[in-house]
Image (tube, rainbow, N blue to C red):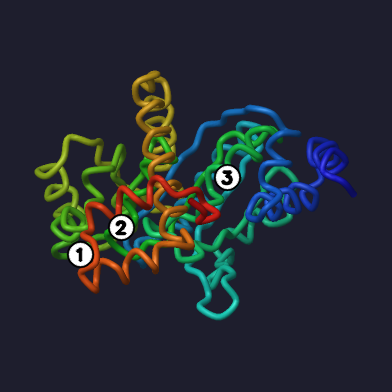
């Protein structure tokens, strides 16, 4: 099946064809797929936060809410890469298993493949594929491993930061930079001790809305969906351009990190044959093939 045939099948509802297209945009055929699909945009909701906060459970609850409205929903779960195969290491869809058989839901794991910032380099392309296939919203759930999570702000708007009750949660979130990129803060597991204290700490640290949620029970879910909708309506061209700029810079940095002459320039700097400033200028002038 060629790319146009896959696109037609995916637009006709084939989740398998959509999955094959997503596989292609993780590799060298990315441009071919995107050319066939054409431009498209969708709401992108980012969900991040520290491990154990209940991000996947929150995402599953959001999927259920949007499906109840008749929306086709896609979830991109960005997982750490295996150091051996380069593939997604977690692939954790257990908490979303209730939606696995729903033809209106696509759940996909993407490996970070060593990309700094917690997001796979294929995420922007994957979002565009899903948007062109009629998935809206697209929910991006990140790895949840600390400071690198802030890069999700380049892709998603709003960014929902999920925290759990516990002493020092607000302080740790501030240290990780999560409060800076949070458009909406959610204290999940709000039926546990310490939830009210965590809410107070967060409200003292940020102007973003701070909501409570018990994701498995759906308690607080309508307020979260409403807050996401309100944020969508407040989006503007300046914010969208800012996200696009951050995406471009992030992807460019990844390309430079894999540049074939980087090791040579680093050796020259280490040996004192040149300095880091001159090497950086040289790297920017070199084409990706390393010639010149």
Would you name the residue on which mark 3 appears? 64
- Position of residue 220 relative to residue 190, above or below, is above
Tell me, for residue 292, which label it has, or none: none
Nearer-the-camera pick, 106 or 229:
106
Task: Return the disc, 3 or 1, that comes first in the chain's sequence.
Answer: 3
Indicate left or right for 66 with 11 as reference.
Answer: left
Camera-side residue of 209 and 91: 91
Image quarter for residue 115? bottom left
In the displayed structure, 255 sits above or below 156; it is below
Tell me the quarter of the picture where residue 110 sits. Answer: bottom right
Q: Which residue is mark 2?
A: 191
Q: Which mark is residue 166?
A: 1
Label pair 1/2, CB-CB below 8 angstroms: no
> Looking at the image, is mark 1 or mark 2 earlier in the sequence?
1
Q: How many marks?
A: 3
- Label 3 or label 2, whichever lies nearer to me, is 3
Q: Position of residue 155 (x, y in %)?
A: 44, 40
Residue 172 showing in the rendered view: yes
Looking at the picture, how far across and down is residue 44, in whole percent? 49, 37
Q: Residue at x 60, y 76 (%)?
A: 85
Q: Residue at coordinates 64% horizontally, 57% vertically from top-left?
A: 98
Left or right, residue 124 beside residue 256: right
Q: CA distance from mark 3 to mark 1?
A: 27 Å
Mark yes or no: residue 219 visible.
no
User: Considering the numbered disc 2 on the image, is that residue within a helix, a strand or a loop?
Assistant: loop
Sequence-first tag of 3 and 2:
3
Q: Is residue 31 above or below residue 227?
A: below
Q: Mark 1 or 2, which is nearer the eye?
A: 1
Q: Is residue 151 left or right of residue 288?
A: left
Label 3: which secondary element = helix
Instruction: State the CA–CA distance, disc 1 to disc 2.
Output: 12 Å
């Amino acid at each position: 099946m060629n790319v146009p045939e896959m696109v037609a099948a995916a637009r006709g509802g084939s989740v398998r064809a959509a999955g094959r297209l997503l596989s292609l945009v993780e590799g060298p055929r990315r441009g071919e797929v995107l050319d066939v699909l054409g431009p498209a945009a969708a709401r992108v909701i980012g969900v991040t936060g520290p491990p154990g906060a209940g991000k996947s459970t929150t995402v599953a609850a959001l999927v259920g809410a949007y499906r109840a409205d008749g929306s086709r929903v896609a979830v991109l779960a960005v997982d750490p890469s295996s150091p051996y195969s380069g593939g997604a290491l977690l692939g954790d869809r257990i908490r979303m298993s209730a939606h696995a058989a729903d033809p209106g839901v696509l759940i996909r794991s993407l490996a970070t493949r060593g990309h700094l910032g917690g997001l796979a380099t294929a995420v922007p392309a994957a979002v565009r594929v899903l948007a062109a296939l009629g998935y809206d919203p697209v929910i991006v759930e990140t790895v949840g491993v600390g400071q690198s999570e802030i890069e999700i702000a380049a892709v998603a708007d709003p960014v929902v930061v999920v925290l759990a009750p516990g002493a020092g949660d607000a302080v740790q979130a501030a240290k990780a930079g999560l409060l800076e990129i949070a458009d909406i803060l959610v204290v999940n597991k709000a039926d546990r001790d310490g939830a009210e204290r965590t809410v107070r700490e967060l409200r003292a640290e940020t102007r973003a809305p701070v909501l409570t949620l018990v994701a498995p029970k759906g308690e607080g879910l309508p307020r979260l969906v409403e807050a996401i909708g309100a944020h969508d309506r407040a989006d503007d061209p300046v914010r969208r351009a800012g996200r696009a700029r951050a995406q471009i810079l992030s992807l460019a940095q990844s390309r430079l990190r894999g540049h074939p002459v980087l090791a040579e320039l680093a050796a020259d700097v280490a040996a004192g044959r040149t300095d880091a400033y001159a090497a950086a200028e040289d790297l920017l002038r070199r084409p990706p093939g390393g010639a010149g």
